[in-house]
Amino acid sequence: FLSKATALLMEQKPDLIVLTGDFITETVLSSSGGGDAYRKKYLHHCVDGLNGMSAPLGIYAVLGNHDLWSGPRATNAICQNFTRELGVEWLRNASVKLDKDGKQIDLLGVDDYWARSYSLSKAYKGLNEDTVKILLSHNPDVNNDIEVNNRKIHLVLSGHTHGGQIVMPFIGSPFLPSNNGQKYRAGLVRDGERQTYITRGVGHHIAPIRLNCPPEVTLITLV
């Protein structure tokens, strides 16, 4: 299934590929809120499924809550395998400058918004206020932090909600892991001059069921 998604992605000939987290989901949480259990085969399946990705401006990724909840061994394994096998560059509270036809974009990335290691301040540090800024954040609730700290971000790219996974007519998703209700469930959301795109993602959480919420590989064109 991942291989088909990767093939669909590459048919679009993207300039840039971004991955917004939750690559593995087998997690055992301890009473301290952290775990260190994962099955290596799932990571290997994920890497194999994503093999074949390439883009002129690179492949960048951030970690999701399930990646970090799986513990430091799992997190390190994800980062090392994705970098070695797929050429992924990680934005863990960091930024990179991209150049396309002489125009610059600041691409920022943060650890998951629920994680202790999350820091938008570190990712934003030293950036010019005048440049276009795109933020990769697994959790779209990062918009709350952007608002409180008055950060100038033009576009946020997120996942986390799975689009609701099970979506009921008129009421939306019965359960959504967000403090903003249905607002950041899926698709494009505008907050003033800032926009957020929340992908429905490729996988699923707990049960392999989707209702009124098909998986997606998202193509975004900047103009």
Image (cartoon, rainbow, N blue to C red):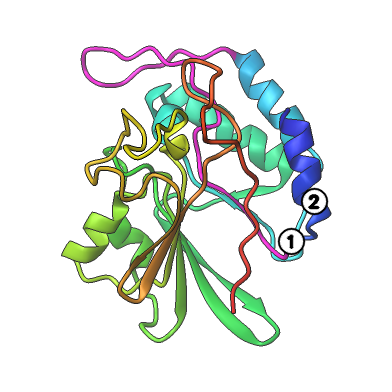
Q: Say which residue appears at 26% left-offset and 63% top-offset.
A: 146
Count residues near mark 2 (Cα–Cα under 10 Å), then give few for <14, some for 14-19, many for 20+.
some
Residue type at mark 2?
Met
Q: Position of residue 92 (x, y in %)?
A: 44, 49
Q: Say which residue appears at 49% left-offset and 21% top-offset.
A: 25
User: Looking at this view, is 142 or 167 the one in front?
Assistant: 167
Apparent side of residue 14 relative to residue 186 in the rendered image (left or right): right
Which residue is denoted by mark 2 in the rendering? 10
Secondary structure beneath label 2: helix
Q: Is residue 165 magenta?
A: no
User: Looking at this view, is 207 or 128 the one in front?
Assistant: 207
Q: Which quadrant does the N terminus fall into? A: top right
Q: From where the camera sits, is residue 89 visible?
A: yes
User: Looking at this view, is 87 or 107 the one in front?
Assistant: 107
* Residue 30 numbered tag: none
Apparent side of residue 220 relative to residue 151 in the rendered image (left or right): right
Q: What span is in magenta? A: 14-39
Residue type at mark 1?
Pro
Apparent side of residue 23 relative to residue 177 in the rendered image (left or right): right
Mark 2–mark 1 distance (CA, rounded to whole Å): 7 Å
* Residue 14 numbered tag: 1
Q: Say which residue appears at 71% left-offset and 47% top-offset.
A: 87
Q: Position of residue 143 (x, y in %)?
A: 29, 57
Q: Position of residue 62 (x, y in %)?
A: 49, 46
Answer yes or no: do the residues labelled 2 and 1 have beta carbons within 8 Å? yes
Q: From where the camera sits, is residue 53 visible?
A: no
Secondary structure beneath label 1: loop
Q: Position of residue 161 (x, y in %)?
A: 41, 38
Count residues near mark 1 (Cα–Cα under 10 Å), then give few for <14, some for 14-19, many for 20+.
some
Tell me which secondary structure the magenta stretch mostly adopts. Answer: loop
Quadrant in the rendering for residue 179: top left
Quadrant in the rendering for residue 123: bottom left
